[in-house]
Amino acid sequence: MDAISSTIHHHITAAAAHRPAANMFPKLLALQPLAIHDSHSKPKKSSRSAVESLSHLLHLRMETPEQKLIVQQSNWNLQFDHDEKHNTPAMSPREDVSDKWREIHGSQDWESLLNPLHPWLRREIVKYGEFAQATYDAFDFDSFSEYCGSCRYRENRLFEKLGISKHGYKVSKYIYAMSHMDVPQWLERSRIAETWSKDSNWMGFVASPLFMEKPRLSVGFLSIYTSKCEATRYNKSSASEQVMEEVKRLVEIYKGRGEEVSLTITGHSLGGALALLNAYEAANTIPNLPISVISFGAPRVGNIAFRDELHQIGVKTLRVVLKQDVVPRMPGIVFNESLQKFDDFIGTLEWVYTHVGAELRLDAGSSPYLKRGLNLLGFHMLETYLHVVDGFLSTSSTYRSNARRDVALVNKYCDMLVDELRIPPCWYQRENKGLVCNAHGRWVKPRRDPEDIPSPTRDQEVHVHGIEMRESCERFESLLSV
């Protein structure tokens, strides 16, 4: 959760992500990439048509030998283009968006901004995607660490450590979540007996909402958002209660100063689902607050009634989707919003899962830097999404040549970049997998910086101290104005 101050208005944003993405499809990930033959081996016509059928089914682009040769020849130039970009800034200069910020955050449902993609909106999408990516990069995945499942940095050091202080935001509170359901693929556990928390995971700076009568929601998503237990250290209150307490506090502060306030919630995968829940709760709790959701690769969350209710209460949602990513098709691969066209015959189906809001649909095949073939994990990775967004102009245009975002980021946790770029796969990791050589020449687990050790008591103390300091500054400012 974090807040940004502006001379125009105060904007509050929240972010969450799904971890680990690799566990989403433990069986499907065992599949090998779709083999593409070369000019020395011509398959039989029947086998070729089978491959074409599979390619069309998965919405993948299959290359003929001639097409592949052209791709190979063009790829020789990619390394040179990539080397030239090393000497340019990784982002364009900031523009003044003060006269268009409401439209950028969905006041007109992003009409006329998506195709072609408005450059100011592209920047906003990438910015919020980087907030969601931060919850992966700072997460402790090490099952041999007593801090597995926590954030590796304190709130005041998170953006600095991850190199995203450029956005001008400041983290004000961490959000922790647990679940009373058996959802091991979503929560990390330490193998160590003595650990910082046996029940909770750091979920980032947001989670999401709420029980309703007619609208129906995924029980798993709802459990993560609303579960709490007095016996735990970090989830005596639920993720819902944690995030809403902070949002309401910040809104009161900025509205009390007579400033405009808006709330944007972002998340990837499970985080995108939780973002919708959070948006629903915030809209029903805080009146007259503009609320928007920008999600990446998010699954369906609720039914048609839930979608309609979000629309009625004014929540604006923009879903960024790669057509090769299978997660947005779930749950409800068959029984989904497409059945609405049969309402006259089968009646309204309240139990089918339905997507919400506007969609920015992208194609990984548009990027000359990405490998062809089937890579379920790579297509779902947030960095792949941000790379394709950064190069997207319109559905009728090729990947833009002046894209600034560093291409190497794509291979952080996967192997998606063409070999000509010479970027190793899964390169984002701690040196020596976190082990350090001590003074005696032994390789050991290092002790965390005391400032970065999770502590619910200290979290509360820091939170209260921050509020007291802010109130003192406000009183001092009011005295000066007198």
Image (tube, grey):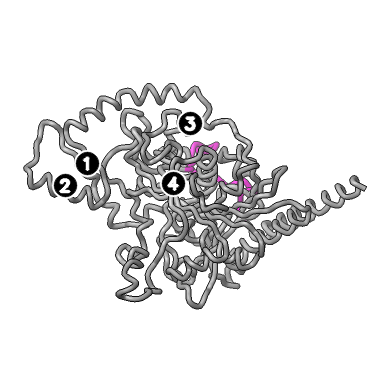
Q: CA distance from mark 1 to mark 2?
A: 8 Å
The disc, 3 or 1, on the residue closer to the chain's N-terminal end is 1
Is residue 69 within the magenta segment? no
Does residue 280 appear left or right of residue 424 in this picture?
right
Magenta span of residues: 434-454
Q: Is residue 16 above or below residue 158?
A: below
The disc, 2 or 3, on the residue closer to the chain's N-terminal end is 2
For residue 62, the mark is 1
Report the residue that reaches farthest toward the right.
482
Find disc 2 in the rendering and name its residue: 51
Q: CA distance from mark 1 to mark 4?
A: 24 Å
Find disc 4 in the rendering and name its residue: 382
Helix, strand or loop at label 3? It is: loop
Question: Residue 127 is drawn in which quadrant?
Answer: top right
Residues under numbered marks 4 and 2 in contact, where contact means CB atoms less than 8 Å apart: no
Q: Is residue 195 above or below residue 373?
A: below
Q: Nearer the viewer, mark 4 or mark 2?
A: 2
Q: Main secondary structure of the magenta part?
A: loop
Q: CA distance from mark 4 to mark 3?
A: 17 Å
Which of 103 and 184 lies nearest the eye of the viewer? 103
Amino acid at dot 4: Leu
